[in-house]
Amino acid sequence: MKKSSNKFRGKNNKEYKKNSDFGNYSNSTNRLEKNDRFLNNSAKNKKVENLKKNDENNTFSSLKRRNLRFKSKTEFPNKNADMNQEFTNKRNLDDWIWGKHSVYEALSSDRAINRIWCTSEIFSSDKYYILFKDLKSKGVLIEEVSWNRLSQLTYGATHQGVALQLACSKTISLEQLIDFSKHNCPNPIIVALDGITDPHNVGAIIRSAEAFDCKGLIIPQRRSAGLTGTVAKVAAGALEHIHVSRVVNLNRALEELKRNGFLIVGLSGDGQISISNFQEKAPLVVVVGSEDKGISLLTQKKCDFILSISLKGKTSSLNASVAAAISLFHLTGK
């Protein structure tokens, strides 16, 4: 029994060993397969992670490039804008004079002046008051402003409370313009501007008025562009060959012209008489209003005739300088 048990045990041990070896082999093969799968998966995961990292780096670098481009686009125009602003500031101040002594000498030398800005202390001083009063009667616009406002206008210059802008041409009085017109032409035409603040329009009207042999131009003291460098440039030399009178009050000036035999003609889109049908040949004053508001109601009451330009297209109105040129062509051709 013992031997049989030993044999049995040996047999069982051999079979157990075989089974255990088989189990170990299967377990090891399973482990190897799992390890291979794990390694393959980990390699794939690493590849995926590397690809993700590359994508992130690429997107980050592209974002970097975009940011750099964006910065370059935003920074350079600002510098250019600042340079342009400085250039325009310098250009606009070419015809300016500031400082007490410089302004006083310019006023005393009878130079053509467009506009004066000063503080209340300068305006009420004995040295400047008489000069300012005389210039104001000649149509020069004088404004009392604060010290800070004057510093803004002169871009921080040492102005000492007073500054002025020179005009490109001298003006004459209304009486002188009337005398000159009547002595040089039997039926003169004078152009009056009402509320035209755009210097380009003023310059273009001056050019047309001189081209059609008008004897003068009337500009009100307020609500109108002065004889600045822009006006002279757009006029293209015509400002040197036509007389300009700058008046304190346009309606009073029109009344004075009426007393001297002038007919006052206003241009308006609502005029009842077409300019092509107008046949009057007396001395005329042609009043041109601004594009947006036209001739003021008070000035319309001073007019003897309100004329219109017949338009055939769909455009409802014309530029002020174009309307003036067309009107002068019709009126001077009669």
Image (cartoon, grey):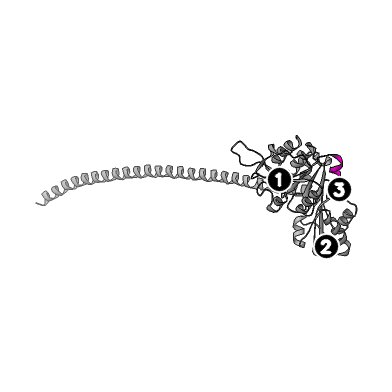
Mark 1 and mark 2 lie on one chain; the one further toward the N terminus is 2
Q: Quadrant of residue 123?
A: bottom right
Q: Is residue 315 positioned above or below 221 on the image?
A: above
253 or 118, nearer to the observer: 253
Amino acid type of the residue that numbered disc 2 sits on in the rendered structure: Phe
Percent across and percent down for residue 291 are 67, 46
Q: Are marks 1 and 3 in contact (CB under 8 Å)?
A: no
Residue at the spot of label 2: 123
Mark 3 and mark 2 lie on one chain; the one further toward the N terminus is 2
Percent across and percent down for residue 48 are 42, 43
Q: Residues within 10 Å of mark 2 (few under 14, many from 20)?
A: many
User: Which marked residue is nearer to the observer: mark 1 or mark 3?
Assistant: 1
Q: Which mark is residue 305?
A: 1
Residue, x 90% and y 55% (percent of image)? 108
Tell me the magenta residue range. 178-184
Q: Is residue 256 positioned above or below 308 on the image?
A: below
Percent across and percent down for residue 293 are 66, 49
Residue at the spot of label 3: 176
